[in-house]
Amino acid sequence: MLRLRPFKPCDAQYVTQWCKDKDVYNKWGGMLIGEFPLSADDINKVYFEKNGHCEEPDNFYPMVAFDESGVVGHFIMRYIHGDNRVLRFGWVIVDNTKRGKRIGQNMLLLGLKYAFEILGVAEVTIGVFENNIPARKCYTSIGFHESPNIPAHMSEVDGERWNTLELIITKEEFEK
């Protein structure tokens, strides 16, 4: 059974193992944390000393998904500019040896349940690089869709321009 818990410093080692190459690191957004290859210390410094680069002190919630075999996935939740009605998911990654088993979908469904039922938000957003087809399929398969109010934008990644799509799901859409 898949469950969620808060991220602990000892979990950073898993994320570094899953960012096995530069392509995975780039599509995960690792450049916002540190240089490739990331170390556990890089992740922990950003998460625990820099509050995930969030300005508000109580605004950054890194989580892990785990099952009987151990930690199998990770993502973060944060409020957008202190607005407690909108939550953003990010830095989503799953153990690469367990891909194709719906772990990403199930992890994010648990995250959505937590966001809507416990935190009481009205909507959840997530950004995804247009060229990250597996992530886009994962997100849209659980109800995320392109936001009509948040335009796509370009991001600089290793000297290339990548299109970033902004996806959204509302509480009403999730409950259907």
Image (spheres, rainbow, N blue to C red):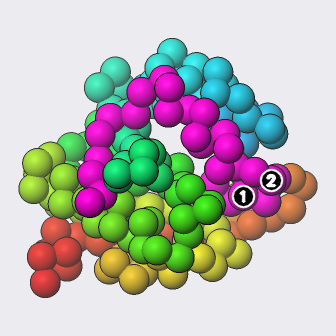
**In the image, residue 155 lies at what x, y percent?**
71, 58
Q: Which residue is mark 1?
A: 24
Where residue 21 is drawn, which disc sits there?
2
Q: In the displayed structure, does residue 130 sit left or right of residue 158?
A: left
* Residue sitting at x 22%, y 70%: 170
Provide residue 136's location: percent of width, then percent of height. 53, 76
Instruction: Indicate whether 134 appears above or below 41.
Output: below
Q: Residue at x 13, y 84 (%)?
A: 176
Kindly identify the amino acid type of the residue bearing the numbered disc 2: Asp
* Magenta-tinted stretch: 1-28
Question: In terms of image quadrants, where is residue 59?
Answer: top left
Q: State the predominant SS element of the stretch in magenta.
A: helix
Q: Nearer the viewer, residue 65 or 28?
A: 65
- Residue 173 in the image, given as x and y percentages of width and height: 19, 79
- Could you tell me if residue 102 is visible in this image? yes
Find numbered disc 2 in the image and state the secondary structure of the residue it sits on. loop
State yes or no: residue 21 in magenta. Answer: yes
